[in-house]
Image (tube, rainbow, N blue to C red):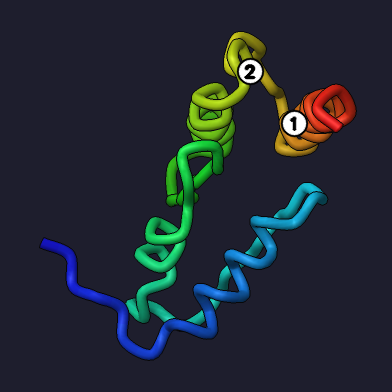
């Protein structure tokens, strides 16, 4: 059972406002250890959002893990091997532009 959030209404509202806008959002959450950052994001993320928690694994493994997470919402995104973070983020940007351009 997950515990309820206490005194996190302001943070939840700010994140929801960023996610509900018409523009594509990139949100960075930072703070000291063990204050609930990951849990906060898991609470507000919806099915169409991408939630990725970086860890201490090798760079290439993290890039692959993120591409698999993105593929949950963008079919086939993980069928490419991205040699760098820049190549993955550029591909994500291009794909998002196409999705939002055709949707709008």
Q: Which residue lies furthest to the bottom in this view?
A: 7
Residue 30 as seen in the image, left or right of residue 101: left
Is residue 2 shown above or below 101?
below
Describe the element under mark 1 as helix, strand or loop.
helix
Residue at label 2?
77
Q: Where is residue 66 in the image (x, y as percent from the top left)?
A: 54, 34
User: Quadrant of the rendered structure where residue 4 is?
Assistant: bottom left
Distance from disc 2 to disc 1, alpha carbons, whole Å, reads 8 Å
Is residue 35 shown above or below 75?
below
Q: Residue furthest front?
A: 104
Residue drawn where x is 57% and y is 38% of the image:
59
Residue at label 1?
92
Residue drawn where x is 47% and y is 52% of the image:
45
Is residue 33 shown above or below 86?
below
Q: Is residue 87 visible?
A: no
Q: Position of residue 39 (x, y in %)?
A: 35, 64
């Amino acid at each position: 059972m997950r515990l309820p959030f206490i005194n996190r209404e302001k943070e939840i509202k700010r994140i929801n406002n960023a996610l509900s806008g018409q523009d594509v959002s990139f949100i960075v959450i930072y703070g000291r250890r063990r204050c609930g950052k990951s849990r906060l994001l898991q609470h507000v993320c919806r099915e169409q959002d991408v939630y990725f928690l970086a860890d201490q694994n090798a760079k290439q493994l993290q890039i692959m893990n993120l591409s698999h997470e993105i593929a949950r919402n963008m079919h086939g995104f993980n069928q490419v091997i991205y040699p760098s973070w820049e190549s993955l983020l550029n591909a994500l940007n291009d794909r998002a532009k196409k999705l939002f351009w055709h949707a709008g």
